[in-house]
Amino acid sequence: MLKAQTPNGVNLRAATLADAPAITAIYAYQVKTGTASWELTPPNLDEVRNRMRAILDAGYPHIVAEVDGVVLGYSYASSYRPRPGYRFTCENSVYVDPSQQRKGIAKLLLSELIVRCAAQGLRQMIAVIGDSDNIASIKLHESVGFVRVGLLPNIGFKFDRWLDSVLMQRALTPGPSPVRTGEGSADLLSREF
């Protein structure tokens, strides 16, 4: 299990299904109070476990940040789109417990996710940010090299208002490059969706 301790004492490690209760609680808060997720009803523990299994089984990184065994937040990558031509592109998600926000945890999680996705041979990472008013998420992504590549106005509806979706993108490898070959790349080249 990959694990790293940051200078501020936060441990970053691969998520396991044992983290599902904490992840469920963090995500439920976001669903109920914010527009980062456009779900209207928080998923229950079983559904969160199923989603985690799908991400892990597909080989994408799923990371938690913890201090003294308490999960403070999490990040993961998932398929950007289901068609095989997109297999070198992933989408990121980052959520932090509300009591731990504005402490740099989201940046730690997203930065580590970028490193792990690049190491797996993924080429591009996409952020689909719910709501153009979500300045914190936009600034977070900009701080680690994402650029705004699109705006889909008024495509979502939550909390009695129309929401935009901001698209941001970051290259995980420098410049146009040939498909990486060698150890571990066969899994990515043959990934089924």
Image (tube, helix red, strand yellow):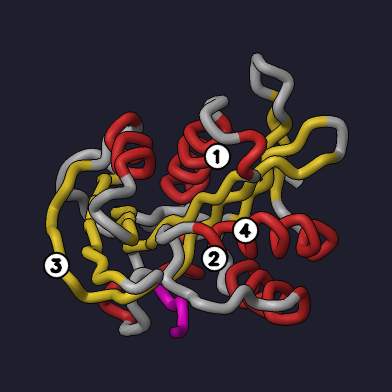
Q: Is mark 4 on a helix, strand or loop?
A: helix
Tell me the tag on residue 153.
3
* Local secondary structure at mark 1: helix
Q: How far apart are marks 1 and 2 (CA)?
A: 20 Å
Q: Which residue is drawn at 59% across and 45% down?
A: 96
Callout 1–callout 2 Cβ contact below 8 Å:
no
Q: Residue at x 42, y 71 (%)?
A: 38
**Residue 169 appears left or right of 22:** left
Q: Which mark is residue 109?
A: 1
Measure how far apart labels 3 and 4 are at the Cα level: 25 Å
Confirm or deny contact between disc 3 and disc 2 (CB under 8 A).
Answer: no
Q: Are marks 1 and 4 in contact (CB under 8 Å)?
A: no
Q: Is residue 192 part of the magenta span, yes or no?
A: yes
- Label drawn at residue 8: none
Which residue type does callout 2 highlight?
Val
Majority SS type along the magenta span: loop
The CA span between labels 2 and 4 is 5 Å
Where are the magenta residues, as a range?
Answer: 189-193
Kindly indicate whether the residue at mark 4 contacts the one at mark 3 (C-beta within 8 angstroms): no
Residue highlighted by disc 4? 29
Q: In this view, does 146 lie to the left or right of 152?
A: right
